[in-house]
Amino acid sequence: MEVCCCSRAKKRWRSFSSLMRFLALLLVLQGVDGQSPCYADRDRKIPLRCMPSFGNAGFEKTVISNNTCGTPPSEFCVQTGVTSPTKECTLCDASDMRYRHPAVYITDIKNDQNRTWWQSETLLYNDKPVTLTLFLGKSYDVSYIRIRFRSPRPESMAIYKKTSTDPNAPWIPYQYFSDSCEKTYKVPTNGIVTRENQQVALCTDEFSSISPLTGGNVAFTTLMGRPDNVNFDNSPALQEWVTASAIRIDLDRMNTFGDEVFGDANVLRSYYFAIIDLTVGGRCKCNGHGASCKNYQQPDGRLELRCVCEHNTAGVDCMECRPLFNNRPWARATEDSANQCLGKYRICLIILTRFMDIFALSWHV
């Protein structure tokens, strides 16, 4: 009778042990759904640093301006220089698709069939600075910003950024452009960044000439001239410096030939700001723990752009470890280490497996 009971107990233990091993296998395989660029193998045992693809972060994103021509309809003239006896003039009318120039036209698709641009009111109606604000939807790692003008480039302009989507987050100076850096922005022309302060905005006069009258570019590379740009993975200051969730462009002063002082209406109509295209080269910021970003629907119905997080990370930017995966502190992935968040359940799994092996052996003693 005792032998029979012992035999049944052993059979039950073997069944229980098999079930527990099966459940443990399910835990190990949790989340495995095919090859991911964040892992070197399909079993997800070898994590790798991964990043979303590089592109134009501003493409078709929301842009607003505090000044746009067309309300009410108004005439503007193409700038041809002071030597031209006549000027070609046309209409800006926000109510007519053929003649409207809203701010969203600086981030739309550009080709021969879609020659669009944004335009401000002319100097005849407005002589105040003009601001354009681009909302990226979430944080991006920005490499460069390029602005292509249809009008002459400004004599003075500035680029600012936000590093958070919080509406109350401050605007941080990113770069100044001016023929009068010290007078306009209290910043020296072509200054130098030191290793002690790598988050300082510089000022250049390189793009502030009135020539060309159309098609001129203004460019800003976020890491150029920053001492630790070759050691980016180990520079929290530069990692913060390239981070932006919104970009603001302040067009502070127009370039003119000086003929506006005479007050001629046609001359004043030829001075305005106009931008063909704004490109923000960068990647959706996932801290090396995600290979893509997508819109997720929130409980209130709105869409929120978030990283598709891997390496057991979570959050909009994969900036924290998932619950039960906090066996070591969160860290940004680097070229040398993916810094995957480790789960405590793996330790429990090892202990559980060892316990089952020891307990099973006791039945055979």
Image (cartoon, rainbow, N blue to C red):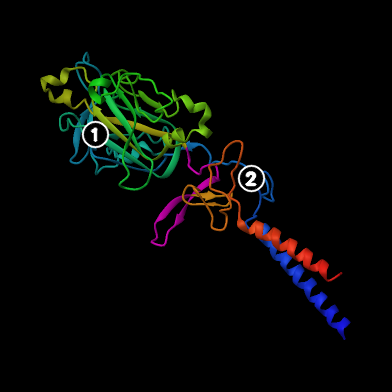
User: Residue 78 appears at what percent x and percent y?
Assistant: 25, 25
Most distant residue in the bottom direction = 1
Q: Tell which of 236 and 185 is nearer to you.
A: 236
Image depth: mark 1 or mark 2 in front: 2
Residue 130 circle label: 1
Decide: is 7 above or below 341. Answer: below
Task: Indicate which disc, 1 or 2, sits on the residue closer to the N terminus.
Answer: 2
If the image is split into quadrants, where does the N terminus sit?
bottom right
* x, y percent for residue 263: 11, 23
Rate crowding at label 1 as few (under 14), some (14 to 19) or many (20 or more) other CA atoms within 10 Å: many
Q: Provide the residue designation for mark 2.
A: 47
Secondary element at image label 1: strand
Determine if residue 126 is in view: yes
Residue 202 highlighted magenta (yes or no): no
Quarter-of-image position of residue 185: top left
Using residue 312 as the reference point, say whether residue 306 is left or right of it.
left
Three-letter amino acid code at disc 1? Val
User: Range of the magenta residues?
Assistant: 283-306
Residue 131 is left or right of residue 359, and the answer is left
The span from disc 1 to disc 2 (Cα, nearest Å) is: 47 Å
Q: Secondary structure at mark 2?
A: loop
Residue at horizontal 21 percent and vertical 17 percent from the top: 257
Quarter of the image for the C terminus: give it: bottom right
**Quadrant hosting residue 279:** top left
Give the camera-side residue of 301 and 139.
139
| Residue plotted at (30% across, 18% down) | 209
- Identify residue type, mark 2: Pro
Above or below 265: residue 318: below
**Image mark for residue 140:** none
Can residue 29 be spotted in the picture?
Answer: no
Crowding near the residue tagged with mark 2, few <14, some 14–19, many ≥20 C-alpha atoms within 10 Å: many
